[in-house]
Amino acid sequence: MKKEYIRPLILSLIAIVCLAIGISLTIIGAINISNGVKKTNNNDNKSTTHIIKGKSTFTTTSNKGIISSTLSSSTTTKKKPNIPYYPSRSGIVFGILSEFNMDVNAFQYITQTMIPNIISGNWTHPERVGASNFDKYIKNQIVPFNESDFNTIKKNISSFSWIPGNVNISSQLNFIRQEFLRTLPLEDKYLQTIIFTSNSDKEDIENSITDAMILNESGQLIIVGVGRKVDESLLKKLSKNVMIWYYGGNEKEITKQLESMIVNFNPNTFTITTTVPPKIFNISTIGYKTSKIINSSYQTTTHQLITTSTKKPYINYNPCFTNIILAVDTSSDVLTPIQFQDEIRLISNHITFTWNHYERVALVSYDENVDTLFTFNTTVDSFDFNQKINTFTQNKGSSLTRLLSALLTLQTRNQKELSIFIFISKLNYGDLQFAKIYSQQLLKKGKLNFIILNKNVSPYDLLSLNASKIISYNFTRNDIPNINKFFETSYSCNFIPSLPLPSTTKTTLPIVTTSLPTTINPSYYYPPKSAIIFAIDSQKNIDNNLYQNIKYYITNIIIKSQWNHPSRVGIFGYDSNKNTETSPFGLSQFSDIKQIVNGFQQLSGDCLISIGLEETKLQYYTSLQNDIKYMQTIIFTSCSNINDIDNSTSNAFFLNEMGQLIIVGVGKNVKKENLLKLTNKVVIWDGNVNDNNTSDILEDWIVNFNPSNLKTTTTTGSPETTIPTNISTTMLPWTSYYPCKTNIILAIDASSDVMTSSQFNNEINLIGNILINNWTHYDRISLSWYNNVPSTFFSYNTIMNKKDFDKILKLVIQEPGYSLSKLLSTLTYLQNNNTFKTSTFIFISKVDDTDIENSRIFANTLLKEGTLNFITIGNNITLNELSKLYTLNPSNVFQWNYENSNDIITFFNQSFDC
């Protein structure tokens, strides 16, 4: 080839190769560019977030451009590693009471072996576990929350030292509530408290009730009684979770049971009262498109999320932010109908006229019973409040004790202190003594104020309750400004102490008087000035010779010739049927008492010491002479059944408070250890009238009774004589009972958790227009309803006719929430004066395992009074849940599907206890 052609050929080949390379590079570049656009998560595209004054600016950088937008959003923080909770999410605190009664070896086993073994290697989140070794006089040894690892916690608990001393359960529970419940880690809503104690002092238990209730409501309270001296029945007044451990015996079982209870605690089925922030209403989210941003590679559209909210306007609290309880006196014993209406007007037109935030107001009426209770979060406004207070009616009797005990059950959703105002027109000595224990518990929650109506109660008597402030209202216009000023300065959030009352030695407790004989008695008393009551076991099965010996022993051996003032001595026989034979107060000669007692005959019932104590209170306490303030009760019993003893504790406590209670166990079958649960003065007698040892013990206790040693208020004054007057009465036509003679409790399910409003209305219609249409004697009917509020109820003797019933039924409204256990606990307070059995009917739309367990003790109490019947509503309750309901041992259960009204009427008729 010629040389001149070679050069162009080479250049051409080079050009072709270059062109090919160029095309290849172009294709590869285009592919890379395309892939770069699509893959937004590779190294060529990076995103950053900048926080600028509450807004986040999101910037995206790519090969081909920059896209930026600003979103209105909250700052997000880095989350902690999501470690599962084991045991369930809750704070856990171990409390050990270091005390004389606890064996030092048992103490060391608890701290060095039992608790470390319970805290197993599977546990997580050590920051929510704590412990306290409590001693009354020496600073606590504490393992606080927020420890970083379990080994440190175990080591610190093992280092606790045994410090012998006198320790109160109440102090330990209060300490845990103050130091641990308040410092609970934010993530943990619940607290499990485990207490180890060798102490079960009765007074200490009573003082522990409030803190125990709070700890139970906050999660669960478990109590381990250590040793054989603890009383399990007393500890169960504080928690249903009680176990007894004998060191050197059942520690493995106790450890396993404790671990199981802690690990299996289920907060998902637990309901507590919590503080919630103000609600936000009408929240709506709207999406707005922003401007489109276009580049040569791709197009994107971003959305700006704008949240708009309308908040309920905040209204300042008037009065200041405190939870208020108003207790209205509805007793007809002292207040005339005009005065009662004046009391209602004073509250409605003057005291509460300018109030707001009625959700923090609870309204209660009381006489002999707590008749009506509108708890917190049930009153909407002033109009609603006035409607409710105008449903109150007067009834006989007055019981401050029952009122205060009922107020302890009230719960709120906030942590503000209580401001309690009690209107009171009547008070007697025994009621005052029994009310003290409850007033102490209420004062821990806030202020306890009294408004005395018409000077019928002495303010000096109320001082023994440690009343915060006291004022009298005499039903005159001039008193109203003072009452308003009293309220303004008595709220717990704005409390201004008043000047102390002038010192005096005289009080004027009104006690029922009896007609005294004209026989003149010496001014001194032997035995000491007190009423003396003997209760004789007169049951049908007692040996007749033994029965005759008891009567002789009392009238000839115990009552000696030196005794004087026979009018203050009473003797009666009792049995299980509440039959009695009575030698009343007021007899002028001991020979008259002896003659009556000699005529006593054995009765038809069995032996129940609980009835003997109850009848002592009913028959003799109410008829104490005006100048007698104390009672010595000596009860002879041939039985000591532990269930009967448990039913006797309340009345035994009352009679001990009134003076002293002495129990004489008769025969070989009584158990002294059981009787000692009621009083520390117990003696066993074999029935031998020549037994001088027993009579000497009894004489020593009776004759050496010293009222000045009792922490009570004394009253001086002269005896009064009650002169009976003839009162003409008009007998109303007698109406037969339909249904039969039984007290009836109706509990309406007012929860909106399951039922629709239409289904709820069907329930109301069934009760108001079908079930009770032909009923009579509405005074023996109690009406209650429940949802998130434990119970709102109208007690016996507050509903007089169908018209009253319908009026109250209109007050029932649906609310979220549900608690059967709290309903049942409230119903146990309801009492009537008649001797009928009680038929309880509860409508129920929902069943919860934990709630069923918490209901068990109260269901048993109601079953002792009569029948307990459930009406399940609709088809929401499963067979498994129904089986749980049956574990409460209800008398009858009926499934109502909103239609079978004839069948449910038949069910009711067959379920009454009569």
Image (cartoon, rainbow, N blue to C red):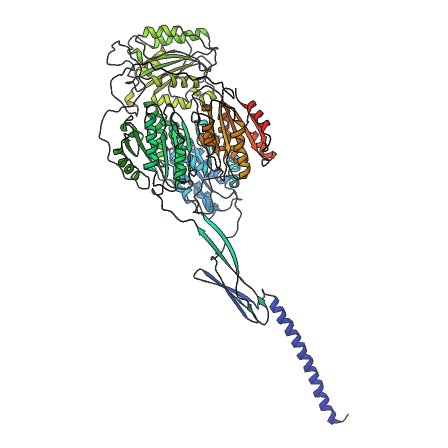
Compare residues 222 and 576 and report the one nearer the observer: 576
Quarter of the figure that contains the N terminus: bottom right
Residue 231, position as x, y percentages in the image: 44, 27
In the image, 800 versus 86, the foreground residue is: 800
Does residue 447 lie above or below 714 as drawn? below
In depth, the one of 674 and 375 nearer the eye is 375
Taking the image as shown, residue 159 lies to the left or right of residue 631, namely right
Seen in the picture, residue 604 relative to 503 is either above or below; the reply is above
Identified at 28% across, 32% down, the residue is 471
Residue depicted at 30% across the width and 23% down the height: 710
* Quarter of the image where one finds residue 901: top right
Quadrant for residue 380, please give it. top left
State whether residue 177 appears in this view.
yes
Extreme residue in the right direction? 1
- Residue 501, percent from left and from top: 24, 31
Residue 277 at x, y percent in the picture: 43, 47
The image position of residue 775, as x and y in percent, is 50, 24
Kindly tell me whether residue 252 is visible in this rendering: no
Q: Residue at x 39, y 21 (%)?
A: 679
Image height of 118 relative to 683, above or below:
below
